[in-house]
Image (cartoon, helix red, strand yellow):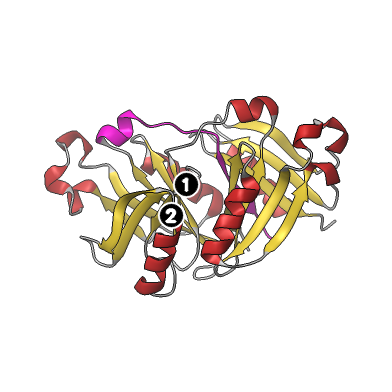
Amino acid sequence: MITINPYLNFAGNTEEAFNFYRSVFGGEFLALMRYKDTFEAERTPDADKDKIMHIALSMGKGNMLMGTDVLGQMAEDLVQSNSFYICMNGDTPEETGKLFNALAVGGKVVYPFDKAPWGGYFGQLVDQFGIQWMADSMNTINPYLNFAGNTEEAFNFYKSVFGGDFFMLIRFKDSPEADRTPKKDLDKLMHISLPIGEVGKGNVLMATDATGKMGEGFERGNNCHLTINGGGVEETRALFNALAANGGKVVHPFDKAPWGGSYFGMVTDQFGVQWMADSADDQ
């Protein structure tokens, strides 16, 4: 089954961030590796050896939130993205409200968690580590992307890669925002959802066209990747190659990983979204 999970970059405070996320969501660390205990140990400065090379926190129904401490020039160049959200929810509005309030501690509430104009409940915040979250109607964590006007083009591409069918496609002209939307933006997408993997068991990839001031201040950033995994090495390789097509950039070819036991690759697709591919060695 195909899954997609967020992979976050931090400039040295991954452990602090993930202890905070565990206090909010519960779950257990499925992996916690420090640079000093990895194949990178000899090339890592002493000051960074105790930092986190990889951490994974189980979340919700089969999801993982993952992260790393980027070092050296990567840490200096780290840019917090305003083009990516993690969309989360509990099983009830009350549980979601508690998660939202817990995530907001030390952070900034952008939209209070309350009834939404389109029905249901909705909230938006930036946590104390600069990560953007939405609280909505899903009981898993799901990636929510912003695009500067080309969401429909991007999602037609992702549909060609992952399959599935759009189960929600709302243009601004058909939304509660229609009267406040400039005419030039009325046909843009306020929301689109594409299920990834088995419906009801996999993830949902979601997005919007950032308009107005959001579009003007749009910055893709480099603090988050989407991690994909197919049903095996060859399926994952096929997804990786498909994401790299039509002008994407392969950062690390999909091949045997230096840490052994799996295959790994990194690619930035034609829309600037960063992906990691990871699959256990099934050969």
| First in residue order: circle 2 vs circle 1 | 2
From the image, tell me which residue sits under label 2. 105
What element does badge 1 sit on?
loop
Quarter-wise, where is residue 113 in the image? bottom left
Query: Which secondary structure, mark 2?
Result: loop
Q: Is residue 265 left or right of residue 113?
A: right
Tag 1 residue: 128
Name the quadrant containing residue 151: top left
Q: Nearer the viewer, residue 125 or 138?
A: 125
Left or right, 180 with respect to 145, comes to left
Q: Is residue 276 above or below residue 250?
A: below
Labelled pair 2, 1 in contact (Cβ < 8 Å): yes
Please state which of residues 95 and 186 is positioned toward the viewer in this rendering.
Answer: 95
Q: Position of residue 37 (x, y in %)?
A: 85, 46
Residue appearing at x 22%, y 37% in the figure: 185
- Dividing the image into 4 quarters, which one contains the N terminus? bottom right
Residue at point 79%, 42% (across, down): 35
Determine the residue positioned at 86% across, 41% down.
39
Most extreme residue toward the left, as rendered?
179
The residue carrying pointer 1 sits among few (fewer than 14), some (14 to 19) or many (20 or more) residues within 10 Å by Cα, namely: some
Of 185 and 153, nearer the camera is 185
Q: Position of residue 268 (x, y in %)?
A: 58, 35
Residue 239 seen in render? no
At 56% from the left and 70% from the top, the residue drawn is: 61
At label 2, counting other C-alpha atoms closer than 10 Å, the crowd grade (few under 14, some 14-19, many 20 or more) is: few
Q: Is residue 7 above or below residue 149?
A: below
Q: Three-letter amino acid code at disc 2? A: Val
Q: Quadrant of the C terminus?
A: bottom right
Q: Amino acid at mark 1?
A: Gln
Query: Residue 136: percent from the left, percent from the top?
Result: 37, 62
Q: Which residues are magenta?
A: 212-232
